[in-house]
């Protein structure tokens, strides 16, 4: 089994998309990264979000860039407060057991 960094996002989006920028930076250095969204963090996955401050990128655009950085595992766990039409593409809905497996298999878990 390969080792990876799991970026666990549990809080609502902030003006600085620090969590996603961190994940993209790690992937830019060829470190395998997975993203897991839970709790209020699922609001990052709303494709209706625009930029949260002037001159910055929207969370949905940063998430769209994940495939270019070979971040192919984006998971969501918990109560889905968004309808499927509002979700960004390529998100896997995980059971709590699957999410726990992701956490257990990760070399590092970084929470935001």
Image (cartoon, helix red, strand yellow):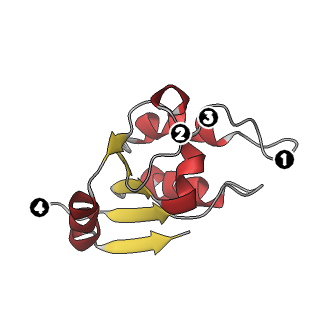
| Separation of marks 2 and 1 at Cα, in angstroms | 22 Å
**How far apart are the two marked residues, 2 and 3, measured between alpha carbons?**
18 Å
Q: Which of the two discs, 1 and 4, sits closer to the camera?
A: 1
> Mark 2: few, some, or many residues within 10 Å (few <14, many ≥20)?
few
Residue placed under numbered mark 3 in the picture? 61
Q: Of the two numbered discs 2 and 1 on the same chain, state the one appearing first in sequence.
A: 1
Q: Which mark is residue 43?
A: none
Disc 4 designates what residue? 1
Q: Is residue 30 in view?
A: no
Identify the residue at horizontal 60%, vertical 54% (top origin). 21
Furthest residue toward left = 1
| Labels 4 and 3: the sequence-earlier one | 4
Circles 2 and 3, Cβ within 8 Å, touching? The answer is no
Kindly identify which residue carries mark 1: 53
Mark 4 closeness class: few <14, some 14–19, many ≥20 residues within 10 Å? few
Q: Mark 2 points at which residue?
A: 82
Quadrant location of the N terminus?
bottom left
* 40 relative position to 106: left or right: right
Question: x, y (%) of residue 35?
Answer: 41, 54
Disc 3 and disc 1: Cα gap in Å?
A: 14 Å
Is disc 2 placed on a helix, strand or loop? loop
């Amino acid at each position: 089994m390969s080792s990876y960094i799991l970026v666990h996002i549990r809080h609502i989006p902030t003006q600085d998309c620090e969590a996603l920028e961190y994940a993209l930076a790690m992937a830019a250095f060829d470190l395998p990264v997975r993203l897991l969204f839970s709790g209020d963090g699922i609001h990052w996955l709303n494709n209706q979000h625009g930029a949260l401050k002037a001159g910055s990128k929207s969370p949905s655009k940063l998430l769209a860039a994940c495939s270019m950085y070979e971040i192919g595992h984006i998971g969501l766990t918990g109560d889905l407060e968004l309808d499927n039409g509002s979700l960004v593409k390529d998100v896997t809905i995980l059971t709590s057991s699957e999410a726990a497996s992701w956490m257990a298999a990760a070399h590092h878990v970084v929470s935001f």
